[in-house]
Amino acid sequence: MGQRPGQARVTPRGHAQIFSSPGALTFFPKSALGPEGPADFYSARSPNGGIVNFKISSATLFLCALGLHAQSIQICPASPTIVAGTTMQFTATTMGLAPGVTVAWYANGNPGGDPADGTISPAGLFTAPAVPPSSGQTRINAIASDNSASAKTFAAIVASGSDNTGGSCGSSAGPSNVPVITSIAPNPLGVGTDTVTIMGSNFQTGALVYNSFGSQSNIQYAASSVTPNTIMVTIYQGQATSSTFTVKNPGSAASNAVTVPVMNGASSGASGAPVLTSVAPNPIPVGTVALTIQGSGFAAGALLYSSWGTQSMIQYAPSSVSSNALTATIYQGTAATVTFCVKNPGTGCSNSITVPINSGPPPPQSIAPNTVSLNLGATQQFTSAGATAFNATAGTITSSGLYTAPATMPASSNVTVTATGPGGNASATVTLINPNPQIVAPAAVTLALGATQQFASAGATSWAATLGTITSAGLYTAPSIWPASGADTVTVTGPNGKATAAITLTPPTPVITSVGTNNALPLGIFSATVSGTGFTAQSTVTLGTSPVTATYAAGSINIGGFYGQSGIVNLIVTNASVSSQPFPVQVGVPNAQVSASAARRFLQQAAFGPTPADAAHVQTIGFQAWLNEQFAMGQVSNYNADTGSQSGMPVVFLTNAVMNPDQLRQKVALALSQIFVTSLNKIIWDNVMIPYQQLLLADAFTNYKQILTDVTLSPCMGYYLDMANNEKANPALGTAANENYAREIMQLMSIGTKVLNPDGTWPVDSNNNPIPTYGQADVTAMARIFTGWTFAASTPGSAPIFGAYINPSAPMVPVSSQHDTTAKTVMTYSAPAGLSAQADMTGILGYLASHPNTAPFISKQLIQHLVKSNPSPQYVQRVSTAFTQSNGDMPTVITAILLDTEARANDAGGNDQPTDGHFQEPALLIPAVVRAFAGTMTTMNYYPSTLASMGQDVFNAPSVFNYYSPGYVVGGTGGLLGPEFQIDNPNAAVLRENFVANLTNSYSNPVLSYGPGTTIDLTPFLPLASNPASLVNAVDLTLTEGVMPAGLKTIITNAVQGDALNGTLHQVETAVYLTLISNYYNVSH
Amino acid sequence: MLIRSRREFMKATLRSVGALGALGSLGKFGEMNALASVSSNYRAMVCIFLAGGNDGHNTVIPISVPSLQEGYSLYLQGRQTLALPQASLQTIQNGGDTYGLHPLMPEMAALYNAGNAAVVANVGTLVKPINRATYLVNQNNLQDVPAQLFSHADQVNQWQTTVPNGGAYTGWGGLAEDSLAAQNAGAAFSPITSTSGCGLFCTGQNTYASTVPVGGASNLIGATDKNRLGAFQNMLAFDNGLKLVQAANTITNRGVGFSQALNAAIATAKINTVFPNSVLGNQLKTVAKIVSIQSALGINRQVFFCQLGGFDTHGAQIGNQDPLLQDLSQSVSALYTSLSQELGADKDVVTFTASEFGRTLQPNGNAGTDHAWGSHHFVVGTGVNSGGSLRGGQFWGQFPSLALGGNDDANGRGTLIPTTSVEQYAATLASWFGVTAQNLPTVVPYIGNFPSVNLGFLG
């Protein structure tokens, strides 16, 4: 392999060769290095005699010092530290590059770098990335365009909070041109301007002088003359400290620094300090003043210095200088004295003269008398020291301050008299008095709305009323509508001016005739119209002891608010001091069948949570009647009508759950969809999943065997678990019947894997192990039973074709040629040889539906979905018995579940058992929150992705095993089941809080919406924020059935109180937010 | 404080970790800087669960196996229409025997051939060693045979707990962490991280999974002010006597604590290795990211659980399994590249596959396969010849005969009776991870039923 210049190789005997353009180098092993060789370095000699040192690492040679004409590049700065997001200039010093060869810059090995590691311009300007790269550093390369040489360094990239380091580079090589200072004259220097001679060596034309004194650092001066050994410069020293000089030649580093003392009045060696004799004016006024200083020996270029207060030696250039007088314009602040001295160029300060400063501006102007009352036309003398002018807003005043009041009363009876003098302006107030005022009678009167009153006033010329009307004869008629002020004013004008009469209006007496419909209000949040008479826009309304919001409209009052107690409650309308008779209102359901709490808890189980209206309805008709109503109600929820595409199904599911009245049907169908699972992850056609979910809604109130049959023959399940086109074993192809559906229908949809008692518990064998319900041989035989089915022909009536493509609109159909007609035995079920596919199907589904495991297996799962995760065996057995006795009649089973004593035990709250409850899965949580506030949801809602992120991507379960398992045991509970906990991982728990946060943060609008499709209205809660305990009671009834434990209420109430500074809306949101994220709420119980 | 060196960073990290206090007390989590660094005392296991039951028959295929006097033709005979063409296979050697990996697994073959991957043959759930004769007689006896063989949910739990008869509520990943708790003292984050849901594998007596979905852990957004946060904390401590409420409180508390701890540390973590933008690739990239902030999290013994689903190939298996195995091969390779080239942690991290069961060799009529039992698995890590712990480039355990109805077939459809138990597989990994021989029966309760506790593929 040939080498190119710049490459190196290590010879087998430990020698190395460098290939450089002038020729090969001679390499010395380390042992050959003299004592001057750097440790760990090797040296080589070039043909022209230069020595180059190398460090050898593997076969890589790093050029370390240059003494020859080899090509090389050095990067400066080396190994800098650069703050993320800042820039640093890199320079490349090249040696020996061929003409025309340039240097290209790389960062992280990329030409120009990259955003993650930093970018570098063709000119070497490096911009560090905004965030340090994971390695904490970026490699910088400078590479010659002919690749003859390269260099690299590593820049450490650090987070902000520091400075770049390593940014300055030493000057390039070459003869030193740094100047040297040996001495400064004069020494010491005087305060002020001095011409200084700097002596030393190596001074060059263009040299600059840098001077530092006190806090002034490196003031730059151009030299007035430069020789190689002398610099003349005129500088200024502000204070008597010390002064330091350095000199720089063009492009050089700074010289050594030389420091000399600076002294006040120090002689610089030149004689002739001037002498002061006087200063005029004396004393000196405060402020800017033109000054004349008399004395002797003033020279051209003399400077004046003044000191006053803490100001010291302020330098002024005089406006004129003669030998015995000097003028200057200076400024004096307030101080007792000011001291002056004068310096000629090159001298110290003259003697000082101190003169007093005037005591300041004249005192503020004053006027007397300050206030006075005058009859119209009367006079009053005002005095004000030194006043130069007097003015008055009404009447007249002479230049000597004699004021004459006007003859008639002006618009305002108050007149301002102003005196102007040396101390500014001063003013006095004159109150004009009409000695013969206009009088009106009566001066004050109380009137009913619309009543009349005759007013009298001598010589009246006009009458006016603010609200009511008044005739030219003074007959006043009060307004007919109650004004906000409750008062009116009559003004009369006559020969002696104006007079007013005050009218107090008597408010109308409110009379309530009706409230809402039937004089009834719903429990909890309400809004209604109060009808009657005597209402005004200012009327207030109370219900019991609680204030309610009241809005007057067209003679009626719309009220809204929250009332948490059922019963007869008095409503009162009040106008100022006048109240209506108490008007009895029925709050909540009269003669309720069940309590408000019980109805809400029941709907948490039987529906997607209570709405206020649904809860009242349950209270009115009772549980059983409500169930009957639901069973009788046709299917309202419909995916066909609303879903344009399959991806819209979760949207429609949520909307239906919130809005549609067929609550129980939907709730049961959701449970069934999690027992008879199909999933969009395999059912990828929009027209296949929709009919399947429609089937479950339609079958929810049929019976178990019907559901099992419809599911088994549905094209959706047929495709999902491969029963469709499951052909009998084919010896030629070496295939067997597909076991997928055969196994899962037993394991998941009917009997389960272990023998069960009717109460859902299981017997064990002598080794304490459960007894399997079936074995692999049963699965194999079951698979054969399910052979021979395919999708219906797309043309109705046509013969089915085995292996047909999916037809979602009709149940699957048998193809006898593909059915395994040999005898089968599955557990205790025997099918003789020769049965048709249909007969085999009917037989096995009947067997499974009546298998003793099925009732407890299905019953317990339905209980878990509707009521609780850990039903007692007795509860399971009661439901299981209902299942068995009714042949799986779904209304019977559902009724048994929901009306069981165990389901209803905690209806009044406070009767929780430690094992009670079930965690609300996301698909229940979201609708329940919206329904609780009587909110609305449309198919624009944003929540399908929220469901998915929380682990319940509705209709898209990860497998036939659903989102979670009915047998999932919750850690830390001593073995309690908690199916829904399987998807409540820590991150999902945070997402649950965030769902609530998104829905309950509107910041400014009490109508909360997260996205366009969902709204809940917190307006009725706002008036309650002033009483946090009452607010929390309202939220409790809304969300936690009115039975929230006192300890939890206290926590939330305190938080609402602590939130007072954020406004009432935020307080309400805090109460709602905290309640919803509490696991007391999330675990329905 | 500007940290200029890794050593300074380590010191600073130790201080901040020490100041964190007990997990679950909100608001105490301090700011942590993150620099990529892996401590010398670090080990991690990455479990990749192939959910649905991966068909091992089309993952590792015999081509010429003189030691068994079998080869491709017997495979072809059993596999029929689902057989992969011999010429398409990625050839690997096990001593004198020639096998092929699935055609879309060249990366895995390369790892194997470099000694950085091993095959563990025919692993499955067992109560104790069993042969065909015993199985056929005692298949419903849980003293001899695992409960609910061929059932997804049950076998998933058995793989994750190593307990073959159900009834276990803790898994061997969590239990291994329990026994090594001292190594993670003061950590602000759970030592087990799942990138998707995790089952019993991640649950110990005292160890619970943190879940870090691809894209990162979620931050609490609604209780950011002191007032609400304080009330939230009080509510999480409020006990109304319901155990399920308490359980939910515990999970919520962990969720908030984990996200605070992780997000403080992971903000600047960056992985440059290119991972496939796939289901598993994105999960393993998340794993690499968390490995890179291991020291910031204060965890020295870390377990990861990742999941790739879709292996329940009852129909159209070829089209369904192919992309999954490709994802597995490419993603595992990317993880190894990141660990070895970028993080310098390849010798500290071992990746292994698991799956509830294998599938029948014999296809069904839907061009698919049905639930079976034993299957082959991969262990990936740096080989001993490169200074690592893995005895790679070879097979461990006994490769089975593929004769239908033969000695290794449970039922005539090519349902492999495992010759290596999940217990042995787990115990070997756990031992490398640091579980002592004394603690091994706690982590793998049935290990005593098997003659060899350590298969030897690690260390």
Image (cartoon, coloured by chain):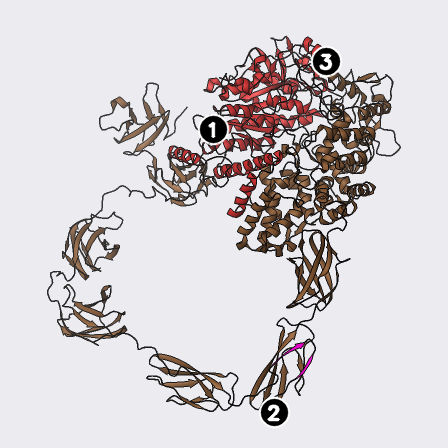
Chain colours: A brown, B red
Q: Which residues are magenta?
A: A438-458
Determine which of the numbered discs, if any, sits on residue B412 in the image.
3
- Residue matched to label 1: B184
Q: Main secondary structure of the magenta part?
A: loop
Q: Quadrant location of residue A88? A: top left
Q: Residue A821: x and y, percent?
A: 84, 18
Residue type at numbered disc 2: Gly
Q: Position of residue A719 (x, y in %)?
A: 76, 30
Number of numbered discs visible in the structure rendering: 3
Estimate the spatial distance between the alpha carbons at disc 2 and disc 1, rounded to whole Å: 102 Å
Find disc 2 in the rendering and name its residue: A459
Q: State which chain disc 2 sits on.
A: A
Taking the magenta stretch, the answer to whether it contains residue A428 is: no
Mark 1, other Cα within 10 Å: few <14 / some 14–19 / many ≥20: some
State the separation of the CA atoms marked 1 and 3: 49 Å
How busy is the neighbourhood of tag 2: few (under 14 within 10 Å), some, or many (20 plus)?
few
